[in-house]
Image: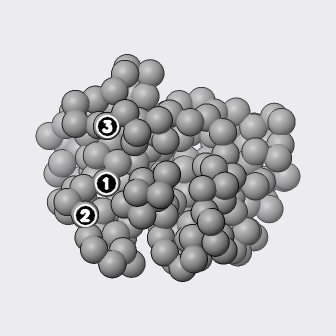
Amino acid sequence: MSYRQNRSLGEPHWFELEAGRPPGLSERVHHWLQDEASLTRRVTAACPGRFRVRVISQCWGRVFNSERQLLGLGPRAACLVREVELLCDGRPQVFARTLMPAASLRGAARRLALLRDKPLGAVLFADPHTRRERVQIARFQPRHRLFDVATGHVEVRPESVWGRRTLFRYAGKPILVNELFLPDLLEEG
């Protein structure tokens, strides 16, 4: 998918993580984006106070074309979309948007639809069979659809934020996790 097509859909230009650090990305932020461990665990460790997950929404919803392609979905495939914030002392550190195709929520993976305020990472990384298949990174600006959702609860709205999306295989089924790194996290850590 070309950059022009992504912009028309309100999406940023995605870079493959393995291609190296894109222009304008600091070493500190790049370090967070390329970390392969549980982001939940790392944010919890960086939080000097109370960590919690706040569920913004969880419902059957629309996916972007590039997400549909990564997940290998047809145009009418249903996806459960879960949007949460990882908070430290009530301050948003990370906005996460997880896409779980209906076909992925069968068998052992059914539990993903019932997480409520439990961190997804606690489930994914507890299973030694979970596989990280692909990681892409992008810079989100106000013209991108997820920017408004991700920064809506931030006290001072930044000019842009960096994020990543990871295609996981959990219980043999695809799950796509988008994580946008908010200014408070990067100042702390």
Q: Residue furthest top?
A: 19
- Tell me the distance, in whole angstroms, between the alpha carbons under discs 3 and 1: 12 Å
Q: Nearer the viewer, residue 106 or 18?
A: 18
The disc at residue 72 is: none
Q: Residue at x 49, y 51 (%)?
A: 189
The x, y position of residue 114, in whole percent, is 75, 70
Can I make out residue 182 in this image?
no
Q: Classify mark 3: residues with Cα within 10 Å, few (<14), some (14-19) or many (20+).
A: few
Q: Which residue is mark 2?
A: 158
Residue drawn 63% across the image and 50% down it:
42
Q: What kind of element bears circle 2?
A: loop
Q: Is residue 173 above or below residue 86?
A: above
Label 2 crowd bin: few (<14), some (14–19), many (20+), radius 10 Å? few
Instruction: Residue 45: name its quadrant.
Output: bottom right
Name the residue type under label 1: Val
Dot 1 corresponds to which residue? 161
Q: What residue is disc 3 on?
A: 26
**Above or below, 35 relative to 101:** above
For marks 2 and 3, give the CA distance. Answer: 15 Å
Badge 2 amino acid: Pro
Callout 1 secondary element: strand
Visible in this render: residue 144?
A: yes
Q: Position of residue 61 (x, y in %)?
A: 48, 67
Asked whether disc 1 touches disc 2, contact meaning CB atoms under 8 Å apart, the reply is yes
Q: Residues within 10 Å of mark 1 (few under 14, many from 20)?
A: some
Position of 17 relative to 96 (above/below): above
Nearest-to-viewer mark from 3 and 1: 3
Residue 132: name its quadrant. top right
Q: Residue at x 60, y 56 (%)?
A: 46
Task: Tell me the element at label 3.
Answer: loop
Q: Quadrant of residue 184?
A: bottom left
Nearest the viewer among 80 and 139 is 139
